[in-house]
Image (cartoon, rainbow, N blue to C red):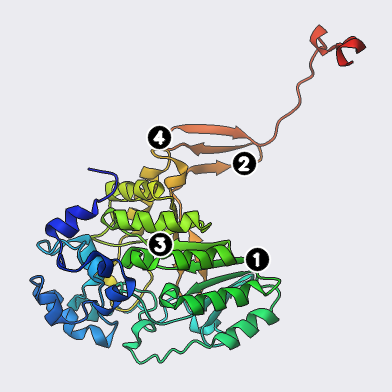
Amino acid sequence: MSSLYNRSAWFEGQGLWPHVPETEWRDWTWQLKNRLTTVEQMERHMTLTSEEKEGCRLSNHKLALAITPYFFNLIDRDDPDCPIRRQVIPRGEEMNVSQEEMLDSLGEDAHSPVPGLVHRYPDRVLFLVTDRCAAYCRYCTRSRLVSNAQDYNFHPEYEQALRYIEAHPEVRDVLLSGGDPLLLSDKKLDHLLGRLRAIPHVEFIRIGSRIPVFLPQRITPDLCEIFKKHGPVWMSIHVNHPRECTAELREACEKLAFAGVPLGNQSVLLRGVNDGVEVMKELVHRLLQMRVRPYYLYQMDLITGGSHFKVDVRKGLEIIRALRGYTTGYAVPQYVIDAPGGGGKVPINPEYVEKITDEEVVFRNYEGRRYHYPLASTPVPRTPSPADTPVVLPVELFQ
């Protein structure tokens, strides 16, 4: 298999919209205007399962349905278990809510001092700048908020949030999220980044976005100039499966990287999508080829209606164990659970340390072999040897 998917393999060959001129296809506003948002639109292009039909009809009570034509072309329309399909096409299972699931699974509302701002960690804030996305992931942590399907009525208060950041000198790190910040116009992004850069104690600006994956056409030269102007702006994208690593995504990531935007990836461990060693290994290798560092692998949050995506934590540990030592360390993401109720991200790692005493650490390597590392040592007296005698070089050597 080639390292990256070729556009012609799915657009000109098996893809839809072949009649659309290249200029329109590459126009991100055309992609947004032509998103698939109804059962009827979907059924013009594929046969939905009964579970999918039910999910599409009920979706607007939980989270809106929207898929860009670009991303829809990545779906295997003949495979009900296609990993791309599972991520964006609703299923009736979303209406099954278990006892441990929560609307606000991360307790963000309880840590929100002003509308649209979450201050959970001491030195950083989450700035929610919009409730809209180019397409909607069916496992979305903020499904209560994005698309307003649940009448959350979220309205970002930019000025209040900026004033809060200005008044709190401990805030050195601001993460722009939502919704997807890259759906804002260039003018709004330029203004927002400029305001943040003008705050002396803000050292670190980040953006969390799935736009490069759903809508790579959005990464325009003008947008890249804004990032250059206000940089460095760090960005975490969100890729879950190797099939999402298209030539278009690679091109978008290169544009961002050349604009001085450091790139990381945050994946969510999802049943039927990426819950296997080989698929995850292929994903992280492709990401590195696109200048993207695998950053986090998330255990899925306890969102309402998400149980059909949930993977056993032991499976996640198995995946990390199969990566560590068997591929470059740059390719190994940190596996984390975002603690329910607002406890923050907690690293979850395979157990390599067997014991720690005053004298040593006993641990196993990636192959399971045991090693000992001494913590305290007693100096051993040594008899001086001729080699300990300093050598005096003639002064003329230095003239």
- Labelled disc at residue 367: 4
- Tell me how far mark 2 sits from mark 4, CA to CA: 23 Å
Disc 1 packing (10 Å; few <14; some 14–19; many ≥20): few
Q: Is residue 106 left or right of residue 245?
A: right
- Tell me how far mark 3 sits from mark 4, CA to CA: 25 Å
- Tell me how far mark 3 sits from mark 2, CA to CA: 32 Å
Find disc 2 in the rendering and name its residue.
357
Instruction: Name the secondary structure under disc 3.
Output: strand
Disc 3 packing (10 Å; few <14; some 14–19; many ≥20): many
Residue 300, horizontal then vertical, whole percent: 36, 66
Disc 2 packing (10 Å; few <14; some 14–19; many ≥20): few
Find disc 3 in the rendering and name its residue.
298
Instruction: Name the secondary structure under disc 1.
Output: loop
Identify residue type, mark 3.
Tyr
- Tell me how far mark 1 sits from mark 4, CA to CA: 41 Å
Q: Is residue 152 in view? A: yes
Task: Give the mark nearest the N terminus, 1 or 4.
Answer: 1
- Tell me how far mark 3 sits from mark 1, CA to CA: 26 Å
Identify residue type, mark 4.
Glu
Residue 365, horizontal then vertical, whole percent: 46, 36
Closer mark to the observer between disc 2 and disc 4: 4
- Tell me how far mark 1 sits from mark 2, CA to CA: 40 Å
Task: Give the mark nearest the N terminus, 3 or 2.
Answer: 3
Find disc 1 in the rendering and name its residue.
203
Residue 256, horizontal then vertical, whole percent: 46, 59
